[in-house]
Image (cartoon, grey):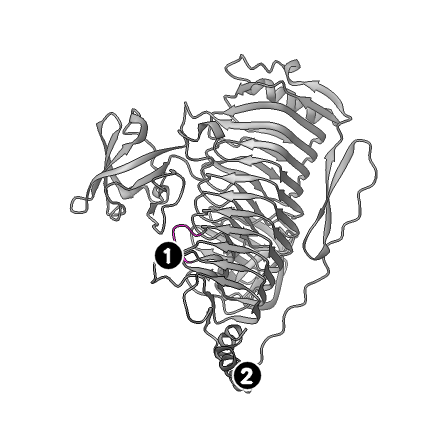
Amino acid sequence: MLSKILSFIASFVMLFQFMFTAVPAVKQSPDVLKEPQPQSNPLRTFDKIEGVSGSEFYIERPSTELKEVKASQFGVDANKADNFNEIKKALEYCANNPNTKLTFSEGTYYLDNKSQLLFKGMRNILIDGNGARLVFSNVVIGLEINGSDCVEFNNIKFDWDWEKHPLSDIVTVRNASAKNNTLEFVFDGEKEVSEDTIFAAISQCDPDTLTYGAKYSNKEVYVYQRPDMIKSVKKIDKNVLQVEHDGSFGNFKNGDKFILRHYVYDTTFAVLDNESKNITFDNVSVYGYPGSGFLANSKASHFQIINSYIGVEPDKKAERHTSLGADAIHIANSDGCFNIANCDISGQGDDALNVHDGLGWVKSIDRNKITLEATAVYMRAGDVLKFRDALFNETDATATIKDITYSGAYYDITFTENVSDKIGLNYIAYDLSCSSENYVVRDNYIHENRARGFLLQSPNGLCENNRFYKTEMQAIKIVMDISPGLWYEGTGVDNLEIKGNEFLMCDYIATGEVITIGSNISGKTATSEPFTNIRITDNTFKEFPERVLNADNVNGLTFTGNTVDAGSSLPKSQTSARAYFGEYCDNITFENNQWQNCIAGEIAKSKKPSLWAIINSK
């Protein structure tokens, strides 16, 4: 009976609505990428990557039939206290001798790394670790792959020297005083502490597992963004620091446990830049680093991280509770064509994977000159910028860069033509010369990390057969996000498929939903639909506190064949398992899903009466 009533309401409301407004048509996706198979080459092999909608691209790898040199020939020795200069010599040899296999002997090699290990201009180089473990100790980039083609890292482990500089500590709050704005942090393990301890970020953790995220609770302070919030630090016992603050820690309660990070975005373990391509990390472990794990930018393309582990070293989990200070994998302003498959990623201080391209805000205009506010854009003379209006609506405006300089978060750009009659203040601009599209993220295990699982903010992606467990916030977020002073990212998504994934106990701290689609322009929602042809099918969602989906700014969304079980132990007041659709949603298919342990009433809500009736009548 309810279904019949809703169907009648749907027909009535749609008829009424169409008298006044027309539903925008779904954007037609362009033809998918179909790269030709690489030509036969005795020095190379390749992996064929089959992506979304039948797309195909290839990632080339060095052949095993290469001239072999041993790292020991350059003086690399596990008995040495520092192997940095010796490894640098080995890499210089590889740069000057393409088609080389550099082999390590099994063992642990410490590095007093004063600068990055540079892989510049390399061709057909295989780094065969044989299980070797390289331990870094200085806060600089670990590996930089610069302008290289066909480089592979295989069977090698990378670690951080916790004895010199621990990445984090577990602390417990006691003697918290809201009146005096003071509290005490007791460090686990009776560690001898110092008043010079670095307070970079303090994130509440699960008191039982000491992993990121406390159930349905979100207490966190990012001290590095505003160091003046801490007024004083005083050591009052061997393992106890008393902190006076400005009220920022006011919701910390006695007994709360936190992961205190000493590093956040201080550096990056591995950077792929300057149009590097055909880069493979296979059977690689990254146990720790004081910043992000992998960064691919500046038009890097055709790269992959496969069969690898990013997380705390398994036999050190009782004493270490952070793998990385920030994101595990961050891809921005690349040329795409990448593959993340069969990886285990956990314990990092930010998202497991963030895929996007950068954008900026027009802050001044003077004929053929503008000032652009941005933090992560890639622009060069000759590139074409695309402009959208202040609420991300489509425009015809483009302009070619003649010259560009920057200072901090501001870029002064001169164009080859006058733009003052094309654009306005707070218009949004991004570079058309790069796009982090065409990617596959498959068969990965993402678990117990701070923040989100995947931020998928670029077109033509396949997210398939991954397992997400206890991600602190959303498991997947599809956004265009401008947060002034922090980040400016996401230029729209078309043709993204999310299928066959398992989501268990995600959004653990109850921030809202398991999957988010939407926009943020300094607190405002875009009035456009930059997300098109998104398909969420045949997934399993289990034991989460609030909504399964929150979607806006999307035209052409399919949510079908999913099994949704909110769990039987949730508070009755929660709106668990429902989906919510915002004002800018059109052409939504929401049907044939199985709902278990969901609160009675309509399955979905929407700001549009017609959409509400349609999706609840299925």
Name of the residue lying farthest toward the left: 179
Disc sitting over residue 570 in the figure: 1
Of residues 183 and 546, the one nearer the viewer is 546
User: Residue 302's x, y, as percent?
Assistant: 68, 43
272 lies above or below 82: below
Where residue 76 sits, quadrant-wise, is top right
Quarter of the image for the C terminus: give it: bottom right
User: Residue 394's x, y, as percent?
Assistant: 58, 68
- Amino acid type at circle 1 is Leu
Q: Is residue 27 visible?
A: yes
Residue shown at 37% from the left, 55% from the top = 569
Residue shown at 26% from the left, 45% from the top = 252
Segment colored magenta: 507-512
- State the residue position of label 2: 11
* Mark 1 closeness class: few <14, some 14–19, many ≥20 residues within 10 Å: some
Closer to the chain start, of discs 1 and 2, is: 2
User: Residue 347's x, y, as percent?
Assistant: 46, 38
276 lies above or below 3: above
Q: Do residues under tags 1 and 2 come within 8 Å of each other at their CB atoms? A: no
Q: Is residue 232 left or right of residue 318?
A: left
Predominant SS along the magenta part:
loop
Which element is circle 2 on? helix
Report how far apart the C-alphas of labels 1 and 2 lie in the structure.
35 Å
Residue shown at 67% from the left, 47% from the top = 337
Q: Is residue 373 visible?
A: no
User: Residue 446's x, y, as percent?
Assistant: 52, 44
